[in-house]
Every structure is written in structure tokens, then in C-alpha cells.
């Protein structure tokens, strides 16, 4: 051993993490109305509590934990629960299928094995590759644990990536609740935690042959931070509108759909003449009533005002205007901003004040959309307008 007492740092972190994860698990479970994703999130937080509790018991009552396998199998629940939480959040179905239980088979297998595993040797020690009769078991578990963390982390990130690709067909704005940036952060944090845990263990075993770095310190600190982030954002999170199943929407939509977009609507019941009629009605609605001034305008709200299903509205935008919903609405907002910036009456108003009044609710998204649409920043556009006004 290096002589460093890791427990003086680890124990306070464990108490904070245990309190946070248990409290958050209960609060999320009591949420009204409680949906499937809330139940999975509550379960995930509870297993974090169990993991931290076992860490603490190991320190306080080490004689009960000569064999650590019963403790370290708990993190094998984290990957499946994170993936199932994100999937339930993005899926229109709110049910837990029989096949979903298969995600927990590795945990159950190792859990059952832990009950009969010899207590002579710990699973993790500085002599991991010692030929003591349990080498195969340690290797199998180590590889299974690594694959569980890696594969479920990757699958979760893929789900989130696909979700973010579809957002612009449903929303005219960006927000934490719909982009799920916090879930992306949690997924990355989760992966980083166990990369550090695994790496520190490998470093101790292969490089120094002594425990210079305590893997549990990374685990406890990371899980505590993770439980704080999850409880703060997860309690308020509801299903984004893009989780609704929509067979007409393309799985991937860019700012401008590709040339094959019309083929995606071959089975649509919307006739060409109806599309033209609805398109003209849509343009009149946008110009006369200016619904785009609503900073949280959604596809559903606009389709209700237009009197056409959101599926057909998406089809009209994609095929007639070669736009998704986000691009369509924000083009009107940009034109509104340009008009107001060009009006001398507004010369004393700040650019962002005008942007917010024109329907934008984020400085970052406004600057990005404005630059993409005009080829210049809002400040550059204003300077150009002021210069032209002076010349006149």
C-alpha cells in the first residue's frame, strides 16, 4: 500500500452520495403522475444508493466483504437502467416488455454465482492474475463488466443522437427539456466514471503493483455527482413530443431534406390539390397572425391552428418548401428581426430584445440561425443597415 488513507476522503463522499441518491429515488418514485421512465429512473438511483452503501459497509465492516463480488456486480445494473430510461423517455410505448428483462440477465447470473463464490479471494486485488483457482472467474467478470458499461453507454448515446436529429420536425426552439442535453451529459459522465475506475485498477495492478489510486474514490465521487444531476433534471423531465410514433416522418431530417423526401410520403392520403390549399392557408396564417412570435411554438400547435394533422403539415413543409418545421418557423423570425432592426424607431433597442420579441428564446440559437440565414452576424447586419440609412 502507498500509505495514503483513501477512506478519509471516501467516507464523506459516500455519505453525501447515499443521502442524495436515496432521497432522489423516493422523490422521483412519488412523482405525480408517475410514468415508466420515472420508475426506471427511481430504480437506477436506488441501485446507486445500494452501491454506495455497500462501499461504506466494506470500509466499516470489512470482515463481511472478504469476497467483493457481491458488491461490484451492482454497477452491472447501471448500464441497462440508463439505456432503458432513455429508451422509455423517447418511446411512445409506456410499457416494460418481457424481452426487456433480458438486459438484467448478466446481473442475475453473476449475482447467483456470487452466492456460491468462494470467500477465500476478493474479485479485485493487486494479484488479479494470480493462478489461485479463481482466475477464470475474475477474467470473465472483468470482461463482462467492461462490455456492459461500454455497450450500454454507446447504445444510449446512439439513441440520444437519433433523437436530436428529429427534433427540428417538432419544435421551433431549443430547450434542455427537448434536446435532453442533460441526459447526454449524464451518459458521458457515467462512461467516464467507469473508464477511470477500470483504468485505475489496471494502473494499480500492471504498473505499480500497489494501490496508489483507489478505484472506489472515482466511483463514489462520480456516482454522487451523477445522482445530483439525475435527480435535479430527471424529476422535471417529461416525454418530448418527438417520442410520438410517426410513420411519415423521416428517421433523419436535416435543415433541408434530401431530394428523395417526396418518396417517403408515397402512402400518404394527402392529395396534391389539398397540399396546395393548405400551403396557401399556412402562409396566410404565418403572415397575418404571426404565430412564430410565440417562442415555444410547436408543430402540434401550428397544425391545430391550421386545421391539418401534424403528419400532413410535415409533409407539406418537406415536399413543397423543402424545409423542416424548425427552419420554416425561424425563417419568419429572422425576417421579423431584420424588419425591426431596419426600422429607425427601434434604434435604441438592443438586438437581443428585438430577437426575443420576434420569437427567439435563446441567444445561441438566434445567432446561429441568423448567421446561417443571412451570412452575417446580427451586429454586422445592424451595422450594414445603419450605414445604408446614413447614406440615404
Image (cartoon, helix red, strand yellow):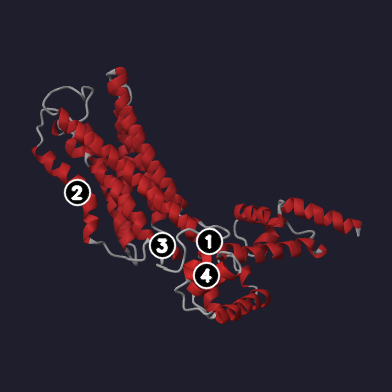
Q: Which structural element holds mark 3?
A: loop
Residue situated in front as seen by the camera: 100 or 350: 100
Task: Give the mark toward the camera: 2 or 4.
Answer: 4
Q: Report crowding for label 4: few under 14, some 14 to 19, many 20 or more residues within 10 A (C-alpha).
A: many
Residue at image point 63% right, 56% down: 369
Q: Position of residue 94 (x, y in %)?
A: 31, 65
Residue hosting label 2: 105
Q: Which structural element holds mark 2?
A: helix
Residue hosting label 3: 238
Image quadrant of residue 42? Answer: bottom left
Q: Quadrant of the N terminus?
A: top left
Residue at image point 56% right, 78% down: 275
Real-space CA distance between mark 3 and mark 2, rounded to the nearest whole angstrom = 29 Å
- Label 3 close to label 4 by CB (< 8 Å): no
Looking at the image, residue 270 sits to the left or right of residue 183; the answer is: right
Real-space CA distance between mark 2 and mark 4, rounded to the nearest whole angstrom = 41 Å
Q: Position of residue 332 (x, y in %)?
A: 66, 66
Query: Relative to 209, does residue 270 appear above or below in the rendering?
Result: below
Residue at image point 10% right, 35% down: 117
Q: Which structural element holds mark 1?
A: helix
Residue hosting label 4: 314
Residue hosting label 1: 168
Q: Report crowding for label 3: few under 14, some 14 to 19, many 20 or more residues within 10 A (C-alpha).
A: some
Q: Is residue 298 visible?
A: yes
- Label 3 close to label 2 by CB (< 8 Å): no
Q: Which structural element holds mark 4?
A: helix
Q: Earlier in the sequence, mark 4 or mark 1?
A: 1
Q: Earlier in the sequence, mark 2 or mark 4?
A: 2
Q: Earlier in the sequence, mark 3 or mark 2?
A: 2
Amino acid at each position: 500500500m502507498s500509505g495514503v488513507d483513501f477512506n478519509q476522503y471516501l467516507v464523506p463522499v459516500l455519505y453525501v452520495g447515499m443521502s442524495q441518491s436515496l432521497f432522489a429515488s423516493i422523490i422521483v418514485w412519488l412523482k405525480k403522475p408517475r410514468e415508466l421512465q420515472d420508475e426506471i429512473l427511481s430504480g437506477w438511483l436506488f441501485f446507486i444508493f445500494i452501491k454506495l452503501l455497500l462501499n461504506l459497509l466494506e470500509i466499516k465492516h470489512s470482515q463481511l466483504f472478504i469476497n467483493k463480488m457481491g458488491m461490484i456486480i451492482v454497477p452491472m445494473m447501471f448500464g441497462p437502467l440508463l439505456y432503458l430510461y432513455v429508451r422509455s423517455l423517447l418511446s411512445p410505448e409506456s410499457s416494460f416488455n418481457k424481452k426487456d428483462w433480458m438486459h438484467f440477465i448478466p446481473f442475475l447470473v453473476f449475482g447467483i454465482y456470487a452466492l456460491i463464490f468462494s470467500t477465500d479471494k476478493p474479485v479485485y486485488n493487486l494479484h488479479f492474475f494470480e493462478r489461485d483457482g479463481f482466475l477464470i472467474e475474475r477474467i470473465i467478470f472483468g470482461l463482462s463488466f467492461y462490455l456492459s458499461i461500454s455497450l450500454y453507454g454507446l447504445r444510449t448515446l446512439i439513441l440520444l443522437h437519433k433523437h436530436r436529429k428529429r427534433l427540428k420536425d417538432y419544435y421551433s426552439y431549443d430547450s434542455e427539456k427537448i434536446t435532453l442535453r442533460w441526459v447526454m451529459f449524464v451518459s458521458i459522465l457515467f462512461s467516464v466514471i467507469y473508464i477511470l475506475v477500470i483504468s485505475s485498477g489496471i494502473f494499480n495492478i500492471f504498473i505499480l503493483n500497489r494501490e496508489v489510486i483507489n478505484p472506489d474514490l472515482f466511483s463514489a465521487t462520480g456516482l454522487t455527482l451523477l445522482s445530483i444531476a439525475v435527480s435535479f433534471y430527471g424529476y422535471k423531465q417529461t416525454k418530448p413530443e418527438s417520442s410520438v410514433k410517426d410513420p411519415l416522418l423521416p428517421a433523419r431530417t436535416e435543415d433541408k431534406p434530401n431530394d428523395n423526401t417526396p418518396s417517403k410520403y408515397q402512402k400518404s392520403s394527402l392529395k396534391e390539390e389539398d397540399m396546395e390549399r393548405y400551403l396557401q392557408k399556412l402562409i396566410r396564417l404565418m403572415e397575418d397572425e404571426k404565430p412564430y412570435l410565440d417562442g415555444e411554438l410547436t408543430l402540434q400547435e401550428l397544425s391545430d391552428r391550421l386545421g391539418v394533422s401534424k403528419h400532413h403539415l410535415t409533409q407539406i413543409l418537406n415536399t413543397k418548401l423543402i424545409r423542416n418545421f424548425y427552419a420554416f418557423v425561424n425563417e419568419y423570425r429572422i425576417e421579423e428581426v431584420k424588419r425591426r432592426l431596419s426600422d429607425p424607431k427601434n434604434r435604441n433597442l438592443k438586438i437581443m430584445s428585438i430577437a426575443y420579441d420576434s420569437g427567439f428564446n435563446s441567444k445561441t440559437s438566434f445567432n446561429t440561425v441568423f448567421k446561417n440565414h443571412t451570412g452575417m452576424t446580427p451586429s454586422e447586419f445592424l451595422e450594414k443597415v445603419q450605414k445604408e440609412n446614413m447614406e440615404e
